[in-house]
């Protein structure tokens, strides 16, 4: 039997031709739309590419470099508020240490901070974001704030403000900042603050307590916590993170004097238990966690360890606009052995669990960190009566953290383990005192 396919072929040909005509028509209508969308998307694509490329380049290159955590890098202490951060950014140099009363021998923990916000918006006088008229008009803060004070009973934070126009900051490294008698550099800090009861009442926008303090101290940074590529030059240039951190002196020895509310304190290197770090960025993290100390005693020997220091910080970092939950950076130098728990170093297989909370009388931190070889369990507590609720304005003019607990008299323990074929072998139980500590969250 034979079949005539000519009619079928004719209709098939007509059908294909019809589809072709419809396709041409659709392409004619849709083509300009797709082209327009591609053109509009191009800046966003280029922006993502520009930001992501140095991040991924730095990540991959770091696998071959892998610098030690105790690697000094004073370029990270340089002034960072350039470009976009000049009008939407903060930068600070933080110092904390312990002094001894000149007559009674009583110890007291102090802090000094040199804080800069939105220098690109500077006016002849400091601009306060919390000033009622500025809140109403959405005006951003711009000033240099010298924050100084003490922890312990009746903890105080005392603020002094300058317009950025009245401050000199050396570009590049090593950094220096000069504002009247206030000065900060890698090797020295000096200055004074003084707020009266009348000034506090008249200026609530200062966010300050009443008191006065004067200091003159040499700074000797012994051990650094370098977080690696997360705060390196390419990642900084890409503005990849919302908040950056570098602890050039997680162990710092201070020497000099402090006058606090009329009382004289001497600060000596071996008992200063000092700490110096740097934070900068476009916004603050929430939750906000910080713990550090080098007043550490070994349970194995019963003696204070002279070459041991730890540092933990972070909470919820944002990278390229994405929030990373429950991420901390942590490190301990245990009698010279460097151990790090860094969420940004994937080859370490880092894991972190933490629980921080308030009781009626204390703030409490429970943090467990591990990598491929070690586990560190840190438990610290600090009495609220020895702490203060530290005040900062965010670069956008809001005051986000209204319950950010800050102290310098934390105590507790660290349990340090070594991993061996799936088992945890206890290396030491460390008793911690004079711990710097911070905890707070805000609603977004």
Image (cartoon, rainbow, N blue to C red):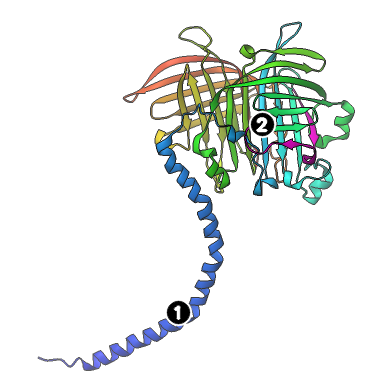
Left or right: 42 as drawn, with respect to 175? left
The circle on residue 27 is 1
- Can the viewer see residue 383 in this picture? no
Q: Residue 284: percent from the left, percent from the top?
A: 64, 39
Residue 345, above or below 14: above
Tell me the element at label 2: strand
Tell me what residue is drawn at x 47 percent, y 16 percent: 335
Which residue of the protein is positioned furthest toward the left in this rendering?
1
- Is the C terminus in the top left, top right, bottom left or bottom right quadrant? top right
Q: Residue 193: percent from the left, percent from the top?
A: 80, 26
Q: Quadrant of residue 208?
A: top right
Q: Residue 257: percent from the left, percent from the top?
A: 74, 15
Q: Where does label 2 land, which residue?
A: 93
Left or right: 170 as drawn, with respect to 23? right
In the foreground, 142 or 106: 142
Residue range in magenta is 156-174
């Amino acid at each position: 039997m034979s079949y005539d396919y000519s009619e079928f072929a004719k209709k098939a040909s007509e059908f294909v031709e019809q589809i072709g005509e419809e396709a041409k028509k659709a392409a004619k209508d849709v083509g300009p739309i797709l082209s327009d969308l591609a053109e509009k998307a191009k800046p966003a694509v280029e922006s993502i590419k520009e930001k992501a490329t140095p991040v991924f380049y730095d990540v991959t290159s770091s696998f071959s470099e892998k610098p030690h955590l105790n690697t000094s890098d004073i370029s990270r202490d340089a002034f960072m508020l350039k470009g976009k951060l000049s009008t939407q950014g903060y930068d600070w140099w933080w110092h904390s240490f312990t002094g001894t009363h000149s007559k009674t021998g009583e110890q007291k923990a102090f802090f000094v901070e040199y804080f800069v916000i939105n220098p690109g918006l500077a006016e002849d006088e400091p601009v306060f974001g919390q000033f009622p008229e500025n809140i109403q008009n959405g005006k951003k803060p711009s000033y240099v704030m010298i924050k100084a004070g003490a922890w312990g009973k009746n903890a105080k934070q005392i603020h002094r403000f300058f317009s950025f126009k009245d401050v000199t900051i050396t570009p590049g490294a090593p950094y220096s900042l000069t504002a009247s008698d206030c000065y900060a550099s890698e090797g020295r800090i000096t200055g004074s603050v003084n707020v009266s009861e009348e000034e506090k009442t008249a200026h609530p926008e200062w966010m300050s307590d009443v008191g006065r303090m004067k200091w003159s101290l040499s700074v000797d940074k012994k051990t650094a916590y370098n977080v690696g590529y997360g705060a390196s030059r390419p990642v900084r240039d890409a503005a990849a993170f919302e908040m950056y951190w570098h602890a050039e002196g997680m162990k710092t020895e201070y020497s000099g004097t402090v006058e606090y509310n009329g009382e004289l304190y001497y600060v000596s290197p071996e008992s200063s238990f000092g700490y110096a770090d740097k934070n900068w960025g476009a916004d603050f993290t929430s939750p906000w966690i910080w713990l550090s100390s080098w007043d550490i005693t070994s349970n194995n020997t019963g003696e204070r360890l002279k070459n041991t220091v730890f540092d933990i910080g972070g909470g919820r970092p944002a990278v390229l606009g994405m929030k990373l939950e429950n991420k901390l950076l942590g490190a301990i130098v245990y009698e010279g052995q460097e151990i790090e728990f860094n969420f940004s170093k994937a080859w370490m297989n880092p894991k972190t669990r933490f629980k921080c909370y308030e009781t009626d009388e204390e703030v409490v931190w429970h943090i467990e960190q591990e990598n491929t070889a070690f586990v560190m369990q840190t438990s610290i507590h600090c009495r609220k009566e020895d702490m203060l609720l530290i005040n900062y304005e965010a670069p956008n003019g809001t005051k986000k953290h209204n319950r950010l607990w800050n102290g310098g008299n934390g105590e507790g323990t660290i349990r340090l383990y070594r991993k061996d074929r799936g088992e945890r072998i206890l290396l030491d139980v460390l008793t911690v005192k004079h711990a710097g500590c911070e905890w707070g969250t805000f609603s977004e």
